[in-house]
């Protein structure tokens, strides 16, 4: 189903009871974030805030805040249907005579929906601001979290063109408002926008930029998708394929770029590669931690175009689960068939919310030979943005990769620390605050598949053992009622599946390492395989919070090591005395004052108590 624009999708959600209107005035600074955060974490509805203080425009948030709404937005009944849709497209028949050729006709018709369709104009250009009329302060741009450096545009569709090849790109890069007509442009080193800017600098020219806000849900998703660098395949093409019809675009009024004709707003302007970069941030990011200030290019807005009655769409990111988890899952489903073309033994994969996309990837495989888990993991490290993965856990087919508990039970049952764990190095997300270097750090592979004789040190080969039942040595986890004490430990508990969670208030270098040595030598270690040392804010009673903290706070090469029979994960804060020279960022937390205010006003918003 193709939605003409985002407002048509909103009307459908409202008819289904999945969008509610808040008519009382709300503050764009923190208040909307606190409301939206509660709603997405409780599976609540999208919200249209009709009166945002200081802006004449309404704001909508949470449009894809559940798995079901994301599927609806992308025109499928379930996100798993995306994989089937792509598999159908790429499985072209190459033989079978006329019948085989005719079998491709429907698929070729689908492919014809890829190129965008040029229109003379569109609703996105019904109202135009230029010159002194341009004032980004009139838009209801959110300040999301207390320590943010300012208001940020959080759902921008940033459009650029390669100055040499003419290839178009659309990406979603946050934009901090720095003045009436200036924002930051968060182009990280691996992003296509950065490559376009570097080329413009070599050519001695400005880089034209258009930023669409809105469009329709398929286009918003497409801007987040990790598309492979295939000539002619861009985000407009992906949106056209998902919506089943070519995407309508029109020329910008002051830039020579195609913009979505059905957008709510379009910001037109340029980035000057000769200009000094500006300090951007902090920003409460999708990791659940603040990204610290850094230098990024400035985007100068020369014109703003919009509909006559536009709605400003926004999202927030922060501690998982958040709305971006469902966009990530959509990308998983969409690109699974492509991964299987390269790694055919892959059955499924999943990036759990606790891993905030790149920190944890679980992959199930059809295993037939020794070492296959490492072959698959290393293959994934070489696939596009999967290069940023920090921990890859490989399990057998039949293990549900999206069942968090089942995966970690399989790890304790099948993966012996040291024997079945392997560290390596590679690129990391530049938002990773714990890596050994900026954008570079350690990675961990855990082989939690059934073991063949060669993998357990047997002299026999699997060829000789074919047809014979082999019993692998089993590990039986059990809880200890006598846990040791150690300075700085605020809370600890062991789990029935072989994990030991610790919250540590770290005050001195080497404290976590010393803790691991003491705990590994204690009799309580006999029934566990993994010791997870978190920071002082870690809730040891919440498995998701434990893993979210651990995965954010480790460089596997430095912080994950075998101690006795345990695999110790040091997720405590790193100190300068330990050789960590970068600043350690705080976790995102809302101010108590805003929390109390939203509590007091909840009945006025007209939202249900179950979402509170």
Image (spheres, rainbow, N blue to C red):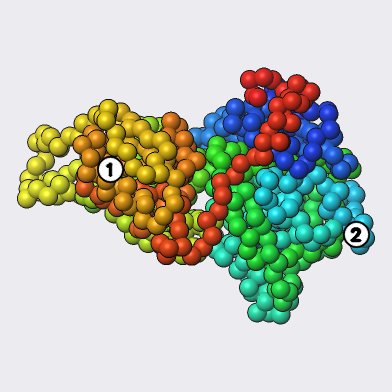
Q: Secondary structure at mark 1?
A: helix
Q: Which residue is mark 1?
A: 519
Q: Residue at x 67, y 36 (%)?
A: 592
Q: Secondary structure at mark 2?
A: strand
118 or 12: nearer the eye? 12
- Rounded to the nearest angstrom, the CA distance separating label 1 from label 2 is 66 Å
**Mark 2 packing: few (<14 Cα in 10 Å), some, or many (20+)?**
some
Q: Nearer the viewer, mark 1 or mark 2?
A: 1
> Residue 470 occupies which quadrant of the picture?
top left
Q: Is residue 276 visible?
A: yes
Q: Is residue 369 visible?
A: no
Q: 448 above or below 433?
A: above
Q: Residue at x 61, y 41 (%)?
A: 589
- Image quadrant holding the C terminus, namely top right
Q: How many marks?
A: 2
Q: Which mark is residue 405?
A: none
160 or 119: nearer the eye? 160
In the picture as drawn, the residue positioned furthest to the top comes out as 609
Q: Position of residue 76 (x, y in %)?
A: 58, 33
Q: 77 above or below 375?
A: above
Q: Residue at x 63, y 73 (%)?
A: 198
594 relative to 402 in the view: left or right: right
Q: Which residue is mark 2?
A: 130
Q: Residue at x 70, y 54 (%)?
A: 149
């Amino acid at each position: 189903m193709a939605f003409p624009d985002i407002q048509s999708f909103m009307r459908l959600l409202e008819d289904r009871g999945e969008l509610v209107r808040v008519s009382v005035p709300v503050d764009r600074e923190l208040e909307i974030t606190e409301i939206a955060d509660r709603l997405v974490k409780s599976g609540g509805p999208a919200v249209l805030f009709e009166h945002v203080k200081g802006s004449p425009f309404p704001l909508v948030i949470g449009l894809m805040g559940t798995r079901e709404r994301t599927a609806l937005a992308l025109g499928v009944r379930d996100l798993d249907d995306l994989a089937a849709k792509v598999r159908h497209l790429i499985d072209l028949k190459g033989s079978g005579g006329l019948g085989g050729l005719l079998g491709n006709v429907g698929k070729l018709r689908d492919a014809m929906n890829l190129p965008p369709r040029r229109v003379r104009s569109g609703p996105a250009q019904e109202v135009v601001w230029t010159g002194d009329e341009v004032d980004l302060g009139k838009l209801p741009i959110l300040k999301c979290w207390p320590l943010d450096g300012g208001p940020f545009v959080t759902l921008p569709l940033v459009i650029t063109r390669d100055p040499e090849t003419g290839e178009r790109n659309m990406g979603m890069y946050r934009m901090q408002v720095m003045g009436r007509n200036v924002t930051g442009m968060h182009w990280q080193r691996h992003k296509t926008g950065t490559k376009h800017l570097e080329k413009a600098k070599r050519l001695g020219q400005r880089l034209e930029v258009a930023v669409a806000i809105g469009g329709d849900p398929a286009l918003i998703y497409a801007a987040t998708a990790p598309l492979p660098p295939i000539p002619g395949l861009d985000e407009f093409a992906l949106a056209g394929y998902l919506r089943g019809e070519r995407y309508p675009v029109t020329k910008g009024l002051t830039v020579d770029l195609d913009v979505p004709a059905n957008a709510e707003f379009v910001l037109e302007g340029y980035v000057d590669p000769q200009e000094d970069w500006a300090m951007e941030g902090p920003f409460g990011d999708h990791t659940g931690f603040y990204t610290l200030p850094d230098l990024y290019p400035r985007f100068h807005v020369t014109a703003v175009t919009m509909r006559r009655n536009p709605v400003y769409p926004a999202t927030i990111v922060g501690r998982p689960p958040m709305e971006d988890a469902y966009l990530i899952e959509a990308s998983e489903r969409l690109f699974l068939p492509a991964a299987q073309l390269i790694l055919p033994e892959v059955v499924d994969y999943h990036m759990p919310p606790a891993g905030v996309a790149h920190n944890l990837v679980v992959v199930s495989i059809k295993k037939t030979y020794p070492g296959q888990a490492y072959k698959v993991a290393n293959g994934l490290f070489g696939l596009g943005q999967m290069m940023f993965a920090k921990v890859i856990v490989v399990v057998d087919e039949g293990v549900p990769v999206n069942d968090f508990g089942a995966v970690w039970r399989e790890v304790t049952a099948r993966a012996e620390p040291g024997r079945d764990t392997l560290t390596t190095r590679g690129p990391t997300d530049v938002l990773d605050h714990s890596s050994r270097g900026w954008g570079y750090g350690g990675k961990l592979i855990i082989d939690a598949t059934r073991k063949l004789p060669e993998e357990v040190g047997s002299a026999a080969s699997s060829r000789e053992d074919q047809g014979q039942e082999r019993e692998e040595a089993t590990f039986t986890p059990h809880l200890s009622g006598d846990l040791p004490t150690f300075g700085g430990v605020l809370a600890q508990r062991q789990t029935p599946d072989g994990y030991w969670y610790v919250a540590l208030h770290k005050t001195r270098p080497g404290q976590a390492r010393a803790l691991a040595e003491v705990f590994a030598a204690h009799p309580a270690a006999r029934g566990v395989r993994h010791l997870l040392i978190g920071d002082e804010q870690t809730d040891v009673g919440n498995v998701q919070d434990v893993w979210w903290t651990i995965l954010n706070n480790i460089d596997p090469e430095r912080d994950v090591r075998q101690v006795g029979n345990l695999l110790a994960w040091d997720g405590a804060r790193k100190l300068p005395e330990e050789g960590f020279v970068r600043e350690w960022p705080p976790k995102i937390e809302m101010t108590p004052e805003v929390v109390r205010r939203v509590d007091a006003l909840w009945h006025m918003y007209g939202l249900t108590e179950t979402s509170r």
